Image: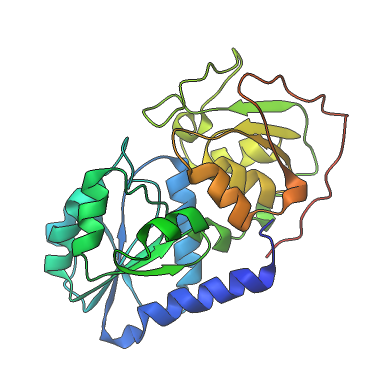
Amino acid sequence: MVKAVTQLRESARLLLDAVGDPSVGVTFLRSWGNRGDDLIYAGIRRLLREVPYVESDIRKLHEAPRTSTAILSGGGAWCKPFHALAEMLPAIEARFPRLIIFPTSFDVAEPIVRDALCRTRAVVFARELESYRQVRDLCDARLAHDSAFFFDFEPYRSGFCRGVLNAFRRDAEASGTPVPASNRDISLDCATLDEWLWTISRHEVVRTDRAHVVIAAAMLGRRVEYRPSSYHKVPAIVNFSVASNLVTRIDDGAEPIPVNARSVQASPGL
C-alpha cells in the first residue's frame, strides 16, 4: 500500500488546490496507453468525483471544450522511448489558459522533454523525488503521489491467490534484459482494466518492471518483485510511494523466490 494514508490525503489536497475553483470550467485531458494508464485515469476520476469536469481524449484536442483549466493525465510519456505529450504541450497550452500536469515521471536527458518543461507555464507535478529533482528548476514543479493511488482497490481483493505472475514489458521502455519464458505483459495483453486487476489479484507473487503493475499488486497486498525499466521511473516510484514490506528489488535474471518462502500482510483499502 502507499507508505502513509496521510501522505496520500496530502497529495489529493495539493492536486485539488492546484485545480482551484471548478466553477470556471475544467477539462480532464486523457492521454492514451496501456492498462496501467487506464488505472491512472480511473484514479483521477475518483479524485475528481466532487468536481464538475468534462473528459476528452487528447488525441482529439481540437474537439476538447475550451474551459479555463485543463488537467493533463500523468504517466510516463516524458522520456526518451515515449515523449509524445512533451511534443503536444505547446498546442495544449494554446487551447487552455491554465494547465495542470498531474503526477508524472520525467527524464530531462531527453531534449524534447527538457525544452517543453523550460517553456511551459503549467503547474507540473512529479510523482517521485528523482523526477522532481530533475524538473524543479525548469518550471512550476510540485510533488504528489501517482494518481493510480486514488483508485478504490477494495472490490479487487481476492481471497484466492496462487503462483507467480511474470509481467515484464517488451516495448521500447524495456531494459533489454531477457524475460522469463512464462512472461505475460498483461498491461498490453489484457483487454480491460477489470481483467488486468483481477489477473494481478489472483497471483501470490507478481514480478514486473511496469510501474502500475507494482502499484496495483502492492495495493492488493500481493508480494512484488520488481526491476527497473530503461530509466529511473519504477524504483523512484517504489521508494517514494510503496511500503517497503511489500516490495523487493530483484537482480536481472533472478529466479522467483518460492511462493512459500515468506508472506506479506494484506494492506487495507484506502
* Residue at image point 13% right, 68% down: 95
Quadrant in which the C terminus is drawn: bottom right
* Residue at image point 36% right, 42% down: 33
Location of residue 222 by image quarter: top right
- Above or below — where is 250 with respect to 144? above
* Residue at image point 18% right, 49% down: 87
Provide residue 182's location: percent of width, then percent of height: 61, 16
Evaluate whether residue 203 shows in this view.
Answer: no
Provide residue 29's location: percent of width, then percent of height: 29, 61
Provide residue 16's location: percent of width, then percent of height: 44, 78
Quadrant in which the N terminus is drawn: bottom right
The foreground one among 89 and 266 is 89
- Above or below — where is 210 with respect to 123? above
**Side of 71 relative to 169 (left or right):** left
Location of residue 84 by image quarter: top left
**Side of 149 relative to 232 (left or right):** right
**Side of 200 relative to 266 (left or right):** left
- Above or below — where is 250 with respect to 243? above
- Above or below — where is 22 with respect to 131? below
